[in-house]
Amino acid sequence: MDQDTGAVISVEGLKHTYDGKNYALKGVSFDVKKGEVFGLLGKNGAGKSTLIKILTTLIRATEGRVSVLGMDPARDGRGIRRRIGVVQQDESFDFTTVQGNFDLYGVLWGVPRQERVRRREDLIRRFGLEGVRKKRAFDLSGGQKRRVQVAREMMHDVDVLFLDEPTVGLDVIMRRELLDFVKEDVEKGLTVVFTTHNLEEADYLCDRVAVIDSGRVLVMDTVENLKTRYIGKKTIEVTVNGEGSGAFYQRLGAALGGSGAVKQGEGSALVLTDNTKEALTVLLQAARDTGTQIEWLNVRKDTLEDVFLESVSKKGDGE
């Protein structure tokens, strides 16, 4: 634990560049408390994975101060690695079976045989892997592979678990089950750093989140406090048909100006606004002007996605 802050993880003024010119991280600072699920929320390329690589000793930071469990990743990588678990985006399996993966991890971490077997059987049961325990890990489905990746990190005693977008490629049911497994261990005192671009997941799992974009932390607070900041705002969800949709979204963003933020997705858009009536008027006028047909329209309460949209929008206005 950091002697100055009492935090399990402490990051101050962290910067990193791969080529000496462009910075993937631009002065990131935050602390993570024991037993907390801390979310790093941002789009692909925001700097989340670079940050995880530094915290887990895979790369050295260009500049700044980092402490993990009271140790400096640049000087005491081995000590940190003994006490953390890491689930990266990419698959990492050997050629053995599911059961063999658990055994191998237990041996690598020096877990005594009797305890190794006990933990293996408990994890296989908890993560629903009984039916595939004799299958090669390479032959598993995507969801089963993710379960193995998370579960085997529990074969040794970890103080901090780093999850770098662990649910990518999983269906809704698989994602929720995996997050529930993590929640069970958090209740026992595990600290988790969780990176995602899925706002629903962050809302479900995290105690606090830091919204990251282009290597900077834009906003950081508890999930509930972030939502509270946006009381009075509403989100309008709109879906239009394919023809003319590009012109419609462009007209909508230009017309709203400072009174609303627009986030375009695949065939749909979110409009965050504190003047619902004005935004709806603008939206309908943009549809008429571009000859676009609105297929679905909904006004809903604020979510973590609204916080993210507003944060990134404000950052864009300031640059």
Image (cartoon, rainbow, N blue to C red):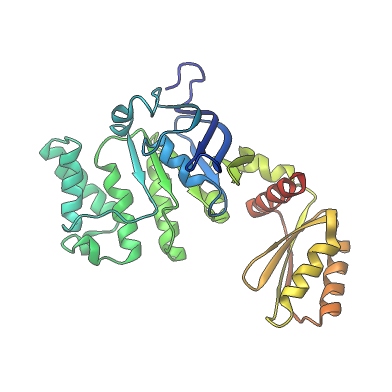
Above-or-below relation of 165 to 61: below
* Residue at x 37% of width, y 35% of height: 57
Q: What is the quadrant of residue 296 in the picture?
A: bottom right
Quadrant that contains the C terminus: top right
Residue 140 in the image: state x and y as whole percent. Answer: 26, 65
* Residue at x 54% of width, y 49% of height: 202
User: How many marks can you see?
Assistant: 0
Residue 4 in the image: state x and y as whole percent. Answer: 50, 16
Left or right of 306: which side holds 97? left
State the residue lying farthest toward the top. Answer: 3
Q: What is the quadrant of residue 207 in the picture?
A: top right
Left or right of 120: which side holds 12? right
* Closer to us: 278 or 125: 278
* Closer to us: 177 or 296: 296
Left or right of 283: which side holds 163? left
* Residue at x 30% of width, y 59% of height: 145
Residue 296 in sight here? no
* Closer to us: 24 or 56: 24
Quadrant that contains the N terminus: top left
Residue 289 in the image: state x and y as whole percent. Answer: 86, 78
Above-or-below relation of 187 to 263: above
Residue 36 in the image: state x and y as whole percent. Answer: 48, 35
* Residue at x 80% of width, y 67% of height: 252
Left or right of 301: which side holds 232? right
